[in-house]
Amino acid sequence: MRLLLVEDDQLLGEGTSAALKHAGYAVDWVKDAETAELALRSEQYDILVLDVMLPGKSGFDLLKGIREKGVDTPTLMLTARDAIDDRVKGLDTGADDYMVKPFDLDELNARIRSLIRRRSGRSNPTITKGNIVMDPASHVVTKDGENVDLSPREFTLLRLLLENQGNVMSRARLEESLYSWHDEVESNAVEVHIHHLRKKLDPKLIRTIRGVGYVVDKE
């Protein structure tokens, strides 16, 4: 999953970015609204984590602008303000959730998982496909009740495909979700990960749509 973090505080940005990467997200971190706008125009993100107090344009103004342009990326706003009016303004501007600083990183991860779950239209915290069960919170995948050892990127790729069962995901879209700006991407990385997932789970789990992408079919 690809995530854009907009936070101008150096220490908080470094810590939050590191924690989210540890949780398996590909994270791009920027420090102002203008750079965030450029990133949102050029990349496709699964989640936007947005600070309210930014240099120049505020997080409120950034969110209002991208919503007016039709960008519907699920957004979690961060703020040091604890006023009810600020939280109401953020939610009415288009935020999907709100956290007040200082925040707990485990709670941040849980709220991001909730936004992803809501976006995919499911209420169950686990994702099931036949005899395969994925728990995004614990990063555990089982087949017939037995744990399956996946690399972090194999897990992320499988999660994206399972979250979008029935929808064909292009190779470019899968790459965008696996790698941030500073990651080195090998030309056949997606194909290699798909091969490993088929070998570890089921050769028929992920179907190739030639010239289009990959899909996990709905039950």
Image: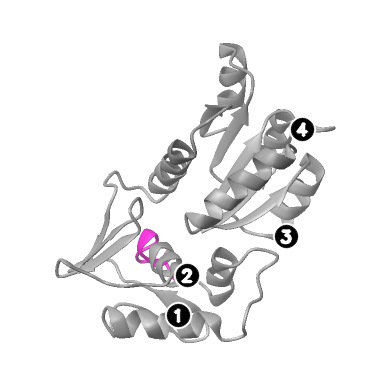
Residue drawn where x is 67% and y is 35% of the image? 63
Query: Residue 199's spot in the image, x, y percent?
Result: 31, 85
Along the viewing direction, whichever of 149 and 53 lies nearer the viewer: 149
Examine the image and state in which quarter residue 66 appears. Answer: top right
Q: Amino acid at mark 3?
A: Ser
Sequence-first tag of 2 and 3: 3
Residue 18 in the image: above or below residue 171: above
Q: Secondary structure at mark 4?
A: loop
Residue 62 lies, with reference to residue 48, above or below; the image says above
* Left or right: 188 in relation to 114: right
| Neighbour tally class for label 2: few under 14, some 14-19, many 20 plus, Cα within 10 Å | some
- Where does label 1 land, which residue? 193
Q: Is residue 165 magenta?
A: yes
Residue type at mark 4 is: Leu
Q: Give the structural element (helix, strand or loop) at label 1.
A: helix
Badge 2 marks a residue whose secondary structure is: helix
Which residue is under mark 4? 54
* Of pointers 3 and 4, the one earlier in the residue sequence: 3
The local crowd at label 1, few if under 14, some if 14 to 19, many if 20 or more residues have their Cα within 10 Å, is some
x and y, in percent, of residue 128 in the image = 24, 60
Residue 118's spot in the image, x, y percent?
39, 43
> Residue lying farthest right?
56
Mark closer to the chain start, 1 or 3: 3
Count of marks overlaid on the render: 4
Do the numbered discs 1 and 2 sit on residues whose CB atoms are within 8 Å?
yes
- Per the rendered image, the range of residues in magenta is 161-169
Q: CA distance from mark 1 to mark 3?
A: 25 Å
Mark 4, residues whose alpha carbon is within 10 Å: few (<14), some, or many (≥20)? some
